[in-house]
Amino acid sequence: MIVNSIRAQYGGPSQTSFMYSKPYSKRIDNLRMPLGYQPPKFQQFDGKGNPKQHIAHFVETCENARSRGDQLVRQLVRSLKGNAFGWYTDLESEVIDSWEQLKIEFLNRFYSTRHVVSMMELTNTRKRKEDPVIDYINRW
């Protein structure tokens, strides 16, 4: 991505491809899922919410379906939508070679975008009459 920006600014052919390429290595691509594996229905993550909780839920869902370790790399995309899916599809081709690496990339990208609540926001927050108490509590 940076290389293409520099090439565009200073000349030279761009290597941008409009074809999708998998961000994980051939080794990951060649991993076989367990016999009889059926992909579970995943909760979707769109870049909002808590990415650590999403990863925890994703791992538990995969393990319940007998998918573990580096097999999770190929499954994560099924749990992404919106901005998170866009991030995944923009990863460079074949740069991911382990679940641990993908998990770190994911958390680095989305954990830092969590909204930090200031003391001023907390003190100015009021429960609206129509809000259920649980929604008011969960707001922060």
Image (cartoon, rainbow, N blue to C red):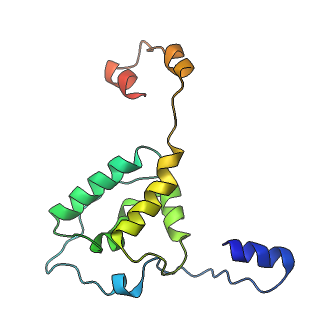
Instruction: Give the image location of residue 42, x and y in percent.
Output: 30, 58
Q: Depth check: give the residue in front, 82 or 121.
A: 121
Q: Is residue 124 above or below residue 43?
A: above
Name which residue lies at 34% across and 69% down: 99
Residue at the outermost right position: 10
Q: Is residue 86 above or below residue 26?
A: above
Q: Is residue 34 above or below residue 30?
A: above
Total numbered labels: 0
Q: Is residue 74 left or right of residue 127?
A: left
The answer to whether residue 38 is visible is yes
Instruction: Give the image location of residue 95, x and y in percent.
Output: 49, 77
Q: Is residue 21 above or below residue 83?
A: below
Instruction: Give the image location of residue 121, x and y in percent.
Output: 54, 21
| Quadrant of the rendering where the C terminus is positioned | top left
The answer to whether residue 77 is visible is no
Q: Is residue 67 left or right of residue 26?
A: left
Q: Depth check: give the residue in front, 81 or 73.
A: 73
Name which residue lies at 35% across and 51% down: 54
| Quadrant of the rendering where the N terminus is positioned | bottom right
Where is residue 35, by image quadrant?
A: bottom left
Q: Is residue 91 left or right of residue 12?
A: left
Where is residue 28, by image quadrant?
A: bottom left
Name which residue lies at 49% across and 19% down: 122
Instruction: Give the image location of residue 61, x and y in percent.
Output: 22, 58
